[in-house]
Every structure is written in C-alpha cells, then in structure tokens.
Image (cartoon, rainbow, N blue to C red):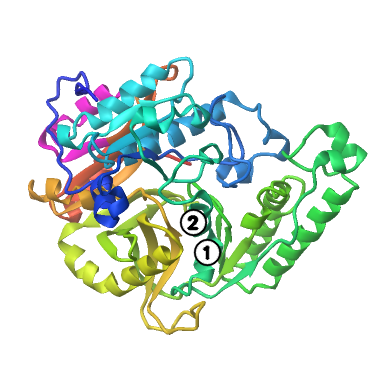
C-alpha cells in the first residue's frame, strides 16, 4: 500500500487508533471472511443523474434522492446541470465514501474501491482520500484503489480481493462476486422489507404497483417522437404507458387521501435523507398530494422507471405509516450481523436531522453505552436473526423510537411494545464511526462525541488551522474531506469529542458558527 503522508499543515495531528474496524468485524462474523480480503464500495448512488461520465445513475436498482424527487421531469436525463452533478459527486463519491473508508480496516484485509469526483483531475480525489486516512494508525489503514467508474473496476484477482461488499447497490456491480447478492441487499434496505419482517414497527399500509411501464418504442406516436426512452413518459402520451401510469398513480393517491393524519409516507428505496414526508395536518396532506401528482410529480417520475427488468423488485411501492405517539427516546443503533444470526452491538447514538428530516449527524454518549446495550439487546438480536435468515451478514443500523407506554402506538405486527423500528439501514451508517472511536475519546477524558457534515470556504489545511487546538489534542478529527479547487469551498465530515454534553454542544456550536450544514 505504501505510507500516506499526513496533510501538509503546521498542525501536528495525532495518530488515531480505532477500537475495531469493518474488516475485523467481518472476520468475526463469518469464517468466509476470516482469511479473505474484501473490496469495499462505499459510494452513494441515485437514479436521477449520472454522477460522472464514468459513473452512471442506477436504472435497475432504483434509488430516489432529493434531485430525483424535486427536479422537473425533463431534467432527469443523461445530460443535465454540470454544477448539480458535481455537487452530488462530491457528496456521494467523496464525502460518504471516505467516511466509511476511515473505519474499513487494514490493507491486508481491506481494499476500498474509490471513484474520482473530477475525471479531469482524478489525482485530487486520491490525495484528499489519502490525507483523510493518513491520521489512522498504519496498521488500520486500508488500501485505496481508484478507477473511473463501476465498469472500470479491475479484475478482482488483480486487486487480490476475494469479494465485494457494497454500501448501496450499484447496477455496475452485477456479475461480480459479492459478500451478499445485490437483490438481497436492495430488498433488505427497502421500506417494504421492514413491513414484511415481523419486527416491531408502527402500523403501516403497503401500496404496491401492478405491472410495469412499457418501452417507449412500443407506445404511442408522442412517446416515439419525444425520444425520452425510459427517462420519463410525456404528459401527452395516449398509449399504454400513459394509461398505466395514470391508473397506478390514482391507486397510490387514493390510498394517501384515505389515510387520516398524522402519518408518514416513504418511498420504497431512498438515499441521502430524501423520500420521507411527515404529514401532521390536512394542509400537509394537501401539499404532499401536490408533490406526488402532476407532470413533475414524484409518482410519475418513479412509475416511469418501473421496467420489465426491475418490476419484480417492486421499486415503486409506497409505505404509509402511523406516527409513533409521544416518543420519549430517539436512537440510532449500529450493530454487525454474523452469518449465524448473532449480533455484535456497536453503539446507540442520537440522530440529528434538518428541517426536511435529512440526516446531518449523530451524537453518542459513551457513559450510557453499557446500559443501552442491555436495553436494546433483545431487539438487536431479533433483528440480526431476521437479517441472517434472509442471507445477510455485515453492518446494519436501525432508527428506533421509544414511546412512553408499551402499546401506545399500534404495531404493524399487533404486538405490544414501547420500541418501534422506524427505519432499517442494512449497510454502514453515518454514525458507525462513533462507537469504534470510543477508546480514542475516552482516553482523552471525553465522554461523548458527535459526527456531522459541513461545508466551509477554503482548504482542509485552513480549516485545521482555525481549530488548531482541537485537532492537536485529538478532540477533533476529519473523517472525510473534499476541497473543490474551482470554487475554493470544501465539503467534509468531522467528529468532535466533549467532556460532557454541555462541553460537546459548546464545541459543536463553535464549529457550526464557522461552517454550513451539508444538504443532500
């Protein structure tokens, strides 16, 4: 692998040693990984836009994010705003990928397959990633392998990699040897999977779509002339495609209209915090119906992507869920699933979201972890057993709301419980770094920590200099960073520790006053 020099800065950065790594956890989780070398693909993906010319959007395994849900229909094509593509690429190919690469593990058992943000300067992406992991103990640094896109991943024999483990499913990974089959990973991360699981979750209605959208060439004159192909169905379509979309859209909208407020509506498969609408009032419901319907509505865009190749995955399913009544606790729990269905508890953190319910960070209290482990042990073990039954082993996270009285919120399974899983992320989560850095922070007398994303003017080195004392002491660490040389703006993810909650909040505020939050 070679050694990675630490960032060229006047600040002397301490070495970070993790309690454990993803590679260590895989080795514990299954004999298949004990002597294997895993190739990790940690990037995000969407089904709206290509991230780069060499990193196409997904067409089969549909993921919806904010651009998919908000862009006008005709902009959901291969060629679109270069600035929007670049913005998404910095988040999905750099910010998210580096954050997980930080905890991947040693090069002897972990290679992280990365994709550059800017094809014109791929070495800049490499330098940024290498600078991020350079603060790790040398024995915990993964090998970084860069290639233009999923179709350009070298033969695994050349990489000395046995299997690929992916964060989210990329169309371009089909045919490669994987730790878990792509369709299994996609299904387990779908919202409908949680409804099927018999795990405790709020009561919900699952609205499925029947059939799929025909090819444009098999439809009407408008579809043929428009040239939209699978990108969208023109409003003027008078053929089978338009009729099918109209019927399926009505089915979903009618279900929404029938649902009394309050409720939560979720797309089947989302990424980046999009695709969830919290409806508290009739006014909210009216706004949601407008968002879902019409020429540029979410439903028309979504239904147009349901094809013969992917309809068996049920990608256009909508989930309408009851809200948890009077929640008294909100937890993000991370754990690791073994191939036998056992669970390795990692940690329980509190999630931070913005006004649009998009995840922006997490906070963990290390002094509470032993009690939280015991509190959630039955639920974690039950969830891990179900995931293993479905053929999964690997990292997982779930968002749990606790209600004051068991049974106060109706469960989808009818059981009486105070704990409701409101989301299940069967992949590395954004907060997974926090439990594995416990030893680093507690040795410094820091009993809680928070990780969050930010944007800032200037470079990594300039940001480190501004917070020099926190970086030199090891109180703050960069988990991912990308400096856009064209705009002189950086996007990053940092973790910061505090002696107690008050100290942590004070230090977080100091950082936030200098920066902006990332919006996905």
Q: Tell me which segment is drawn in magenta.
A: 459-478
Q: Secondary structure at mark 2?
A: loop
Residue 201, placed above or below residue 338? below
Question: Is 302 left or right of 159, judged from the image as shown?
Answer: right
Which numbered tag is attached to residue 278? none
Q: Which mark is residue 193?
A: 1
Instruction: Note whether 30 is above or below 462 in the view shown.
Output: below
Quadrant of residue 200 in the image? bottom left
Position of residue 222 measured from the top left corner of the image (x, y, whole percent): 89, 38
Res 137 visible: no
Q: Nearer the viewer, residue 514 or 227?
A: 227
Image quarter of residue 115 = top left
Give the answer, above or below, for where 25 lies relative to 173. Answer: below
For image coordinates 25% across by 22% down, the residue present is 461
Query: Does residue 289 appear left or right of residue 12 in this picture?
Result: right
Res 89 visible = yes
**Which secondary structure lies at badge 1?**
helix
Q: Main secondary structure of the magenta part?
A: helix
């Amino acid at each position: 692998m070679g050694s990675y020099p630490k960032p060229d800065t006047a600040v002397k950065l301490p070495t970070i040693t993790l309690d454990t790594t993803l590679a260590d956890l895989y080795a514990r989780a299954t004999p298949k990984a004990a002597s294997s070398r895993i190739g990790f693909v940690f990037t995000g993906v969407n089904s709206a836009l290509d991230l780069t010319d060499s990193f196409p959007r997904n067409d089969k395994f549909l993921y919806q994010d904010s651009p998919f849900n908000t862009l006008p229909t005709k902009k959901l094509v291969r060629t679109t705003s270069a600035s929007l593509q670049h913005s998404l690429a910095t988040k999905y190919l750099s910010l998210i990928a580096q954050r997980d690469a930080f905890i991947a593990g040693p090069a002897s058992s972990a290679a992280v397959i990365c994709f550059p943000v800017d094809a014109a300067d791929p070495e800049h992406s490499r330098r940024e990633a290498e600078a991020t992991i350079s603060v790790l103990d040398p024995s915990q640094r993964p090998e970084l392998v860069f290639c233009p896109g999923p179709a350009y991943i070298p033969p695994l024999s050349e990489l000395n990699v046995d299997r690929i483990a992916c964060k989210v499913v990329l169309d371009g990974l089909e045919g490669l040897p994987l730790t878990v089959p792509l369709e299994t990973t996609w299904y387990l991360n779908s919202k409908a999977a949680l409804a099927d699981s018999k795990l405790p979750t709020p009561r919900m209605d699952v609205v499925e779509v029947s059939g799929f959208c025909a090819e444009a060439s098999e439809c009407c004159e408008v579809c043929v002339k428009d040239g939209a192909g699978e990108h969208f169905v023109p409003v003027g379509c008078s053929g089978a495609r338009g009729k099918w979309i109209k019927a399926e859209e009505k089915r979903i909208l009618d279900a929404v209209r029938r649902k009394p407020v309050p409720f939560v509506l979720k797309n089947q498969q989302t990424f980046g915090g999009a695709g969830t609408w919290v409806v508290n009032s009739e006014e909210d419901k009216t706004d949601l119906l407008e968002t879902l319907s019409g020429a540029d509505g979410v439903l028309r865009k979504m239904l147009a992507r349901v094809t013969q190749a992917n309809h068996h995955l049920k990608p256009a399913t909508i989930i309408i869920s009851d809200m948890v009544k009077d929640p008294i606790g909100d937890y993000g729990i991370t754990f690791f699933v073994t191939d036998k269905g056992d669970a390795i508890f990692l940690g329980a953190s509190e999630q931070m979201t913005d006004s649009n319910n998009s995840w922006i960070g997490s906070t963990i209290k290390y002094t509470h972890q032993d009690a939280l482990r015991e509190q959630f042990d039955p639920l974690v073990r039950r969830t891990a057993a179900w995931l293993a039954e479905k053929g999964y082993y690997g990292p997982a996270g779930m968002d749990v709301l606790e209600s004051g009285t068991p049974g106060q919120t109706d469960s989808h399974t009818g059981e009486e419980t105070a704990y409701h899983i409101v989301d299940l992320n069967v992949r590395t989560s954004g907060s997974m770094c926090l439990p594995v850095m416990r030893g680093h922070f507690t040795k410094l007398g820091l009993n809680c920590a928070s990780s969050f994303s930010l944007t800032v003017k200037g470079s990594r080195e300039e940001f480190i200099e501004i917070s020099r004392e926190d970086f030199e002491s090891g109180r703050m660490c960069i988990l991912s960073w990308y400096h856009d040389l064209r705009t002189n703006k950086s996007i990053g993810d940092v973790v910061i520790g505090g002696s107690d909650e008050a100290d942590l909040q004070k230090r977080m505020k100091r950082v936030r006053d200098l920066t902006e939050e990332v919006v996905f």
